Amino acid sequence: MERGRSGNTWTQQAYLKASNTGGGDLFGWSLALSGDTLAVSANGEDSAGTGVNAPLQGDNNAPNSGAVYLFTRASGVWTQQSYVKASNADLDDQFGSSIALYGDTLVVGTPNEDSWGVGVNVAVQGDNSAANSGAAYVFQRNSGVWAQEAYLKASNTGTDDQFGTSVAIAGDTVVVGAAQEDGNGTGVNPNTQGDNGATDSGAVYVFTRSGSTWTQQAYLKPSNTGAGDRFGDSITLAGDTLAVGAPFEDSIGVGISPSAESDNSAANSGAVYVFGRTSGAWRQDAYLKASNTGSGDMFGSAISLAGDSLAVGAPEEDGAGTGINPGITSEADNSAANSGGVYVFR
């Protein structure tokens, strides 16, 4: 859709389909738009091809391997520019479960990828001995041509960690969430990456680029790591500020940085953690809870940063109020089950 430049009227500009449309491909699973470039994922696409513009678009021998399609707009006309597959495309990897686009750089999350490799551009892409450990792929466009620039794995790859659950990019920084990572550590770069004592607690990994070389800058855990919290289920990045959602976090706390972060009497109420970076070093700046925390609300399921504003979705919040700031009485009225709510922080 496009809004007319002279007013507030929206019109449909295009209807897009894949170049190899197939049943169950789930084209449109994830979207990312940057300027006149649109990335569309189809994480159920079945082609056995690998790389950029693979010739085997009609070869459906790798069910649910996934694909990403890149479209560009010129003079109001959209065209498909590229068809992108993983360098190690394999069945059920679901390449494109999450995507992020920033200018000429595309990041693709593949949480069901199975390689046991560790780090950046490891050589064991074809060794599938770590089921659903996950991976992320970075592609770069030069003179209109896309090519894979990096293959990212966690520094502590583990079976079922689902590295690539979420991805975000800003400039030369890429962030990857692994919502089912099991580390028991807390804070920034804890030395307990090999301690899997907190099942599905979740983790987030930060990578930075110098030239065309990517390195891992940080491994992030929340200040109150808990099993099943799924820290990293959602992420959003703006400059040196990163917000991470943990929609299954259980604290009864209310508001900003409450003291009750270890009181887990509000199951799956959810939380969001805000991190800041200075001179390459990350720190946790805030721990956010809803103003009306409730069990099962899943605060942090969706998050978005823009400048100094952060919006947080809680799709299973139960408030019966309507409109903006309906009041504390409405916030406490849980008579509209799973109606949902959104909270804006500055």
Image: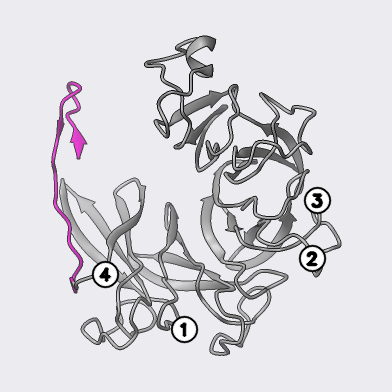
Query: For residue 185: magenta?
Result: no
* Of pointers 4 and 1, the one earlier in the residue sequence: 4
Q: Can residue 279 be seen in this view?
A: no
In the image, residue 208 lies at what x, y percent?
A: 64, 58
* Label 3 CA crowd tier, 10 Å (few <14, some 14–19, many 20+): some
Residue at position x 56%, y 71% in the image: 134
Q: Is the magenta stretch mostly helix, strand or loop?
A: loop
Q: Give the range drawn in magenta.
A: 1-21
- Against 308, is 245 above or below? below
* Of pointers 4 and 3, the one earlier in the residue sequence: 4
Question: In which quadrant of the rendered view does residue 243 lie?
Answer: top right
Q: Name the residue under label 2.
A: 193
Report the amino acid beneath label 2: Gln
In the image, residue 67 lies at what x, y percent?
A: 34, 71
Q: Name the residue under label 1.
A: 88
Question: In which quadrant of the rendered view does residue 132 lie?
Answer: bottom right
Q: Can residue 332 be seen in this view?
A: yes
Mark toward the viewer: 4 or 1? 4
What is the C-alpha distance between the residues marked 3 and 2? Answer: 10 Å
Instruction: Using the image, tell me which numbered label, if any, was put on residue 25.
Output: 4
Left or right: residue 188 compared with residue 117: right
Report the amino acid beneath label 1: Asn
Question: In which quadrant of the rendered view does residue 80 lie?
Answer: bottom left
Disc 4 is placed on an element classified as loop
* Of pointers 2 and 1, the one earlier in the residue sequence: 1
